Image (cartoon, grey):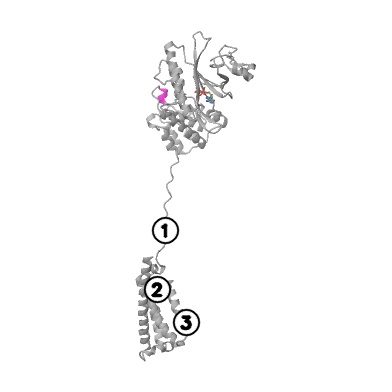
Amino acid sequence: MQLHCTRPGCARPVNHFADLDDPNILKSVPQKFCMHCGMPLILVGRYLPTKLLGQGGFGTAFLARDRYTPGMRSCVVKQFQPSGNLKPAQLKVAQDLFEREAEVLEQLGREHPQIPDLFAFFEVTDPNSPKNAKFFYLVQEYIEGQTLEAELVQNGRFSESDMRNALEQTLKILEFVHENGSIHRDIKPSNIMRHQNGRFYLLDFGAVKFVTKAVGNIQSSTGIYSAGFAPPEQISGSQVFPASDLYALAATCVMLLTGKSPQDLFDSYNNQWNWRKQAQVSSQFADVLDRMLRHAPAERFQSATEVLAALAPKPTPPPPTPPLPTPTPQRSPIISRFSTLEWIGGSIFTGFEAGILAIAMVSLLGTTLISATFWLMLVGILLLAQYWRFIEKIDLVILAGVSLLTVGFVRQLNEAGEFVRAGHPALNVLIFAGLTALVALAIGLVFRLIFNLVSRLL
Ligand SMILES: Nc1ncnc2c1ncn2[C@@H]1O[C@H](COP(=O)(O)OP(=O)(O)OP(=O)(O)O)[C@@H](O)[C@H]1O
């Protein structure tokens, strides 16, 4: 089995121990030492660093195995070394800070599924160092995946939709971090990881690095940042805010969208970011990122929640409401189709015509069944013609006049009308037709009255 020495600067840190391939020896061996520098390799007797994961400005990350777990769980051991030769009082401050920050990390990791769990934190004194140098270690959950920086190298620039997904997930993590009173301080592509299951994780809270740098000047955040990503207030050593993390997150996004480093995208002469032309993104998305990148923290979004709201698709205006359907008439179509005046006119016309036709039919065919049938048919046709409005208004007057003249002055058609006043057949026809018109009017009005009553009751 291979074990990696954690002493900074060890010239030959990789050690091989064949006996550790036996699980029984692996579990029971008290300690192993670096064959080159003599540094104890099994940290606090439990964690076995097997491989170097990366070396940052503040310390080193190792892939390790936890020999106290049944499956020899994989974990990440991060080592921080306080800078310089510390006086005992400074070392005490560093120890206290480290402990406090580790507690915060433990709580964040326990409560949020996308922050690696903190398994342990401890210090190791270098036995071979004349000044008894101290190293601080954090042991945390190993996330199987790739950092966004590694993805950029491997797959090239991010698409807008992929970037949005990563950004939104990271903002949700930051929302939680900020609500818990913490600030990450070191957001950048190498500190966001995409797990194989697609979830994004936020790594490497800068607060712990702060311990390594801040001894003797614990009020300042000077130096605890990554160039290009950190906002101006952090670079100048002023107070940091949730908006400081938002700035670094937006700088991360523009790097991933353009494939260029922040230094290449920031115009320091004009103090502005020039990235939009180098990425293919919607103006809404670009506007959000630009606001996160404003110089003054007060001009940025003030919280991750605000950014998430700005990213959310704007609700599309509701389609114009269609005009209300005209209510289906509750009453008889005949009543709604014809006004009272039309009813009266129609009744008079129908009665009048029925009288004229009766005279004509009786004159031509006598009082026979055939004449009655013809009469009924003709009256029916007249009624339908009015109902369908083939004849209406002035047509009624014209038709009545034409039929009166025809029947009144054609002898064969008005013989039956001679029974009232001999010698004036046209007048007889008019009187008879007028009477039938009155009867029809009376019937029509009664009919309409009944209809009105029934429709109101229904
Ligand atoms: N919890 C983790 N799970 C899996 N891999 C991790 C984890 N933490 C760190 N790594 C890997 O280790 C690498 C080194 O991490 P580390 O935090 O030491 O350095 P960095 O973030 O690249 O640099 P700096 O320390 O300057 O911020 C990361 O890039 C990542 O690939």
The residue to which callout 1 is attached is: 325
Give the residues drawn in magenta, as a range.
Answer: 232-236
Q: Earlier in the sequence, mark 2 or mark 1?
A: 1
Main SS category, magenta section: helix
Q: Residues within 10 Å of mark 3 (few under 14, many from 20)?
A: few
Picture disc at residue 373: 3
Does residue 22 appear to the left or right of 435 in the view shown? right
Q: Are marks 3 and 1 in contact (CB under 8 Å)?
A: no
User: Disc 1 residue type?
Assistant: Pro
Q: Point out residue 321 in the picture as x, y percentages from the top left corner.
A: 41, 52
Q: Quadrant of residue 363?
A: bottom left
Q: Point out residue 222 in the picture as x, y percentages from the top left corner.
A: 42, 20
Q: CA distance from mark 3 to mark 2?
A: 25 Å
Q: Secondary structure at mark 1?
A: loop
User: Disc 2 residue type?
Assistant: Glu
Foreground of the two, 75 or 296: 75
**Residue 23, magenta (yes or no):** no
Picture disc at residue 392: 2
Q: Point out residue 128 in the picture as x, y percentages from the top left corner.
A: 53, 9
Residue farthest to the bottom, as pictured: 422
**Res. 303 visible in picture:** yes
Q: Nearer the viewer, mark 2 or mark 1?
A: 1
Q: Point out residue 117 in the picture as x, y percentages from the top left corner.
A: 50, 26
Foreground of the two, 178 or 258: 178
Q: Secondary structure at mark 2?
A: loop
Q: Nearer the viewer, mark 3 or mark 2?
A: 3
